[in-house]
Amino acid sequence: MIRFLRKFLCVSCIFLLLASLSMFMMMHLIGSWNEIVLVDQEKQAHIASLSGRKICFVGGSNLSYGLDSYRVQEYFGMPVANMGLHAGLGMNYMLYEINLYVNTGDVVVLVPEYNQFINYYGSSALADLFIQTKQWNNCLMYKEWTTYPSYLCSKVFTPSLLKRKVVDEYADNPKGFNEFGDYILHLDQPRRVFPCLPLTERPKVDQIHIFTNEVKQLRERGIKVILLPPSYALTSFNMSKSYIDEIASTLEIDSVPFVVSPARYALNDTLFWNTAYHLSAEGRRLRTDLVIADLDSIGIN
């Protein structure tokens, strides 16, 4: 028994030492990475600066890479904020954030990526944001604790072991956004080969219910909320169709349906740049045409 306790105490001390060392390394290295998630602060500053009625797009990188906000603003005559950044921030955080900046009469266009109905509370990207911005209270409240080990390995140990970081000059560069929040650095770059990105598990119905309740609360405040499907490469869409149909049917049962069929935004693979969600310049133009047409048919003015 005494031997067991000694081993237990020894292992516990080693674990606490490693955890403390890891946290120290993360805190010491904050600011030494060029993080895409930090653009969230710039997007908040932009939306906070807008006065009067506005159109706010909320979702993941399918929006940042695939929308021409200037054209939307010119067509509807209302200021536009593209809050789309990274699906890994989670719809839970995105809805919390947008609630801070919208008022009665505003238009919120929600365009969640399909995997966000599987991981509603976010992934390591959200942990990244909290740590980079030193939101320690949010770190403690964040539910997905399993993301922190992967975050630590990707940000501290792996670069240290490899002695280098893989940097893509044209993808996810924090300097690649325009004043509306659109990512534009990739627009003149040739299309890259990328793998299919189908959904690998069923959507979580309980998380969809949480999402739709949040939408209803926004509507109760007099905010016009519109739910559009994300742009998604056709091959990946077809491979995921049964899961997407389940998402769409659950949303409809909850009285928060997509305003158009998800198939409308299932675009040819050749229109995507480097992932099944990131559109090329041509794809961005076509998707913006679709968004303007859909919002116009609903009537948002």
Image (cartoon, rainbow, N blue to C red):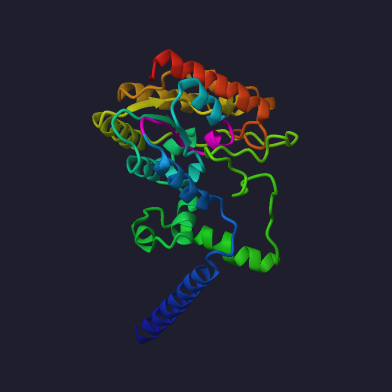
Q: Is residue 172 left or right of residue 252?
A: right
Front-most of residues 41 and 12: 41
Q: Quick check: 28 above or below 33?
A: below
Q: Residue furthest left?
A: 220
> Does 279 sit left or right of 90 as displayed?
right
Q: Residue 263: give x, y in percent of width and height.
A: 53, 19
Q: Residue at x 45, y 16 (%)?
A: 296
Instruction: Judge whether residue 153 is colored magenta.
Output: no
Point out residue 33 in the picture as x, y percentages from the top left corner. 59, 61
Residue nearer the viewer, 8 or 98: 98
- Magenta span contains residue 61: yes
Answer whether residue 282 is visible to the viewer in this image.
yes
Residue depicted at 57% across the width and 33% down the height:
198
Which residues lie in the magenta part? 52-67
Question: Compared with residue 126, is residue 71 higher up or lower down, i.e. above or below?
Answer: above
In the rendered image, which quarter contains the C terminus?
A: top left
Occupied quadrant, residue 267: top right
Asked whether residue 260 is in view, the answer is no
Residue 20: percent from the left, percent from the top?
45, 75
In the rendered image, the quadrant that contains the N terminus is: bottom left
Q: Is 161 or 60 nearer to us in this picture?
A: 60
**Residue 29's x, y, as percent?**
55, 68
Spot the residue most to the right: 190
- Which residue is rendered at x = 45% and y = 51% of the image? 126
